[in-house]
Image: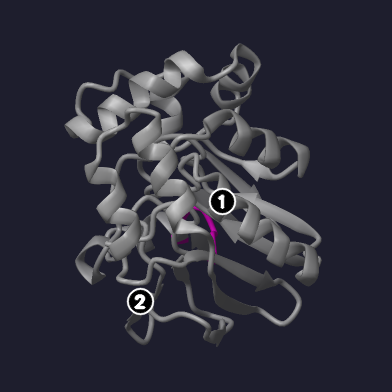
């Protein structure tokens, strides 16, 4: 099976379209969405429409949980909270119900786990090796070989044996039998690893190869929508800088 792995779309319609246009050329058998379809940007309904139409396997991220009422938004920073409260007003009721039913994690291809933040919590960040270390015992306990996660908005790969690779893109990695992995495909809608291009990953379950991808999109159109919608201007600089 060829699986596309996407995360943190964050209501960025231009980036989402660019990624799915590329996926139309790659033709994966399935799309795995690691959550946070909503938040930050100006097109939550349109982006949810696309993900639903593509019948992606999804989980709910922390922004999704707050937008659809599963969690309170008060622990978010002010810019994120403002967008969440707006999206809660804008998002259609059927979209909210769809996100609320998504659940916090999914298992696919038998030993692959899809989460948003970590296997423990959708609000937990995995950014460096110290964050990754506590996860291995939980993966072993549940016989999980590969955990795909988002939330940090940084393309990254951690291997239980052999260290880690961070912020590498357009690279292929052959995953070895007998090892466990934590893999973040990067963010579609708001990258934070210094590369503003939309990020996603492709996983070939037969060859056990994971490939990081980046794709250009019209950042100017997205930032104009942020300002026109009255969302916090600070969200613009994050998109243009990719961090």
Residue 79, image x, y percentages: 23, 34
Q: Which residues are magenta?
A: 140-145
Question: Magenta stretch: residue 7 in it?
Answer: no
**Residue at coordinates 58% horizontally, 78% vertically from top-left?**
211
Assign the magenta stretch its main secondary structure.
Answer: loop
Tell me the mark number nearer the camera, choosing from 2 and 1: 1
Other-residue count near label 2 (Cα within 10 Å), few / some / many at <14 / 14–19 / ≥20:
some
**Residue at coordinates 69% horizontally, 57% vertically from top-left?**
20
**Residue at coordinates 26% horizontally, 54% vertically from top-left?**
237
Question: Magenta stretch: residue 144 in it?
Answer: yes
| Closer to us: 12 or 181 | 12
Disc 2 element: loop
Is disc 2 in contact with disc 1, using a CB cutoff of under 8 Å?
Answer: no
Residue labelled with disc 2: 167
Residue 130, image x, y percentages: 20, 66
| Closer to us: 19 or 160 | 19
Residue labelled with disc 1: 14
Above or below: residue 49 compared with residue 10: above
């Amino acid at each position: 099976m060829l699986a596309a792995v996407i995360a943190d779309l964050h209501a960025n319609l231009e980036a989402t379209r660019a990624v799915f246009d590329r996926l139309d050329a790659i033709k994966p058998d399935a799309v795995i969405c690691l959550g946070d379809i909503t938040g930050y940007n100006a097109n939550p309904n349109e982006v949810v429409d696309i993900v639903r139409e593509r019948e992606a396997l999804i989980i709910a991220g922390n922004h999704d949980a707050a937008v659809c009422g599963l969690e309170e938004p008060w622990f978010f920073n002010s810019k994120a909270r403002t967008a969440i409260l707006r999206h809660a007003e804008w998002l259609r009721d059927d979209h909210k119900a769809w996100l609320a039913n998504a659940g916090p994690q999914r298992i696919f291809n038998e030993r692959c786990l899809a989460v948003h933040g970590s296997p423990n919590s959708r609000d937990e960040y995995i950014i460096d090796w110290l964050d990754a270390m506590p996860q291995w015992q939980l993966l072993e306990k549940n016989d999980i070989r590969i955990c795909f996660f988002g939330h940090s908005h940084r393309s990254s790969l951690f291997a239980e044996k052999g260290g880690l690779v961070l912020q590498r893109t357009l690279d292929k990695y052959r995953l070895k039998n007998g090892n466990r992995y934590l893999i973040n495909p990067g963010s579609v809608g708001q990258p934070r690893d210094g590369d503003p291009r939309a990020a996603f990953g492709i996983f070939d379950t037969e060859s056990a190869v994971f490939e990081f991808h980046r794709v250009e999109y019209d950042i100017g159109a997205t930032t104009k929508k942020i300002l026109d919608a009255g969302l916090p201007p600070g969200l613009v600089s994050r998109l243009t800088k990719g961090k």
